[in-house]
Image: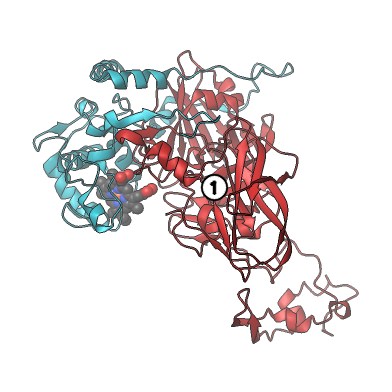
Amino acid sequence: MGKINMENPGSGGRMSRRKLLLGGAATAAVVLVKSTFGKMVQTSLPESSLLLADPTKVPGPFPGEIGTRSEFESLAKKATLTSSRTPLQSLYGTITPSDLHFERHHAGVPVMDPEKYELLIHGMVDKAMVFSLNDLKRFPSVTRIAFLECSGNFRTGKVEMSPQDICGLTSQSEWTGVMLSTLLREAGLQSGASWLLAEGSDAAVMTRSIPMRKALDDAMIVYAQNGEAIRPEQGYPARLFLPGWEGNTSIKWIRRIEVGDQPYMTREETSKYTEEVKDGKIRQFSFDMDARSIITFPAFPQQIERGWVEIRGIAWSGRGRIVKVEVSTDAGKSWDAAGLTGPVLDKAHTQFKLLWHWKGQETEILSRATDETGYLQPTMHQLIAARGESMGGYHLNPITAWYVKKDGQVLHRPER
Amino acid sequence: MMQKISALFLLSFLHACSADTVRYQELQTEQANFSEETPDNWPKSFGLGKEASVARISSMDIDVRPDGKGLPSGSGTVAYGRSLYLTKCVSCHGSKTSSGIYDRLFSYDQSRVHPDSLKGNKRNKTIGNYWPYATTLYDYINRAMPFNAPGSLRPNEVYSLTAYLLYENSIIDENTVLTAMSLPRVKMPAQKRFVNDTRKGGAEVE
């Protein structure tokens, strides 16, 4: 430590944190600790924990250029080849840290040069236009907080499933950009224009048809997320954002908008993102995300202790505001209204909380959301009754139950 | 010229089935009104961006609609499509008798359940029993396939691959030649199954 000039730390070049603490000889210790399930497991301790026994006796690292997450926290998305899921059970409040926003893309994340980026708007417009990123940023800007959810956001089948496993394809950000209506006004819409095609610059050249109604209502072209440029995984440098609509329609890395008078029937709105319903029918253009909620604490893999438990979770609706969330702690026999953390925003994850005194009994806890249209989150049973046994896997928003065991273990209660 | 021909096809295609006509009309009358008043202090135009050149538009305008708008000239045959499929696609998608690692592209018949689903393979939605428009096949293969070299196929190749897949799904016969004229006319058996979303919030679960 003596080598560092504390008077003038900048003068000798900045030492890395690891070097500062360990003089370059870093080895993590392997120790035995008790896991959440009470089992002894082997784990490696962060190096600094060995040295920082009393942090009041050692000066810490100096201010840095970029923040860090505590090395004691292990937040991670769960990734497969096609998506990665937000760890809902590890988050607080309603904003998803940008690096934990779920990902779903069909041919990987493209590298996009912001200097070369351009958005083309053409078709049934008076004047076909090209906007650079800088142009987009010069238009009057709009900022709003809203969730984004994939319509394939439901998994079940095992007891050992966390909120991340069940519905980790929903995340929330503060988005900043320009209203799409502002851009369409510049181009001028011709009469009869009723749909548009949005196209991305990824290797899937992803396309979706969007009704003009939505384009002129609250659609945005966003370039910022939670105060900084949107992340590559979220469509850097600009994406379409359609609040409350199934995530796939919010085309990332958007490069082109064609205005037309009918839908284009792309693969993503015919072969995919459509669902079988009753009588052999296939439902198409199911854009809106219906109201849903999930308890994120307590939930698998957490374990609770007897006494007061604050049940926490999030509720959201693509059709507007959440007006009520009810929680049952007796397997659905009775329901109590949970408190909602304000401000309750339109088409946004909304936090709910309910105090519960747990005396060690085995039970099931559940939550159900109601939105401003009066829609009450259904059970899986109701969804099957409405859509039929062969219903597809999109737009499933059933009430999710957590099974609390006597020892405080919390398990998912599978739907099928 | 191309536009006019396409419009004619659209008409015949719409008249073919009245239930589809109603659905399509619903889809065409989406409201196009600017919902919010433009703020008083906004200029008529912000003067940002530049006008797009015709060359620029045509280099990017690759989409193909059900009425055939966007289809390039060229043609394709089942035989050529089969040979292309065996070199460029079979490794990922398998064949009629063997499964591939990715999406299954063949159905044995036009019923809902694919024989594979009996063996626990749930991929029973295929071109023959689920895709509502043949033009989608052209559009998708052209923009996104083969997965490891998207955008590498020429129009004749895309027409041919489309023809081969339609043939293997029992939609067209082996001698059909696909062009910008004939492809939009191909009627897909699943089209009649498609309905518009009627969910609208409120008390009803749909």
**How far across and how far down the image is residue A171, in percent?**
59, 48
- From the viewer's side, name the closer residue of B139 and A328: A328
Left/right placement of residue A137 relative to residue A250 reads right
Left/right placement of residue A45 relative to residue A262 reads right
- From the viewer's side, name the closer residue of A89 and A133: A89
Q: Residue B83, relative to residue A62: is it above or below?
A: above
Colour theme: by chain
Q: Residue B49, relative to residue A235: is it above or below?
A: above
Tell me the amino acid under the disc marked 1.
Ile
Left/right placement of residue B59 relative to residue B72 reads right
Quarter assignment of residue A67: bottom right
Q: Which residue is mark 1?
A: A399
- From the viewer's side, name the closer residue of B12 and B176: B12
Tally of numbered tags: 1
**Farthest residue toward the top?**
A191
- From the viewer's side, name the closer residue of A349 and B33: A349
Give the SS element for disc 1: loop
User: Which chain has been coloured cyan in this picture?
Assistant: B
Q: Quadrant of the C terminus of chain B?
A: top left
**How far across and how far down the image is residue B86, in percent?**
18, 53
Q: Residue at x 63, y 47 (%)?
A: A334
- Inspect this view and state whether residue A253 appears: no
Left/right placement of residue A99 relative to residue B107 reads right
- Inspect this view and state whether residue A220 appears: yes
**How far across and how far down the image is residue A209, in percent?**
43, 31
**Farthest residue toward the right?**
A7
Determine the chain carrying the residue at label 1.
A
**How far across and how far down the image is residue B179, in percent?**
20, 30
Q: Colour of chain A?
A: red
Q: Quadrant of the N terminus of chain B?
A: top left
Q: Residues within 10 Å of mark 1 (few under 14, many from 20)?
A: many
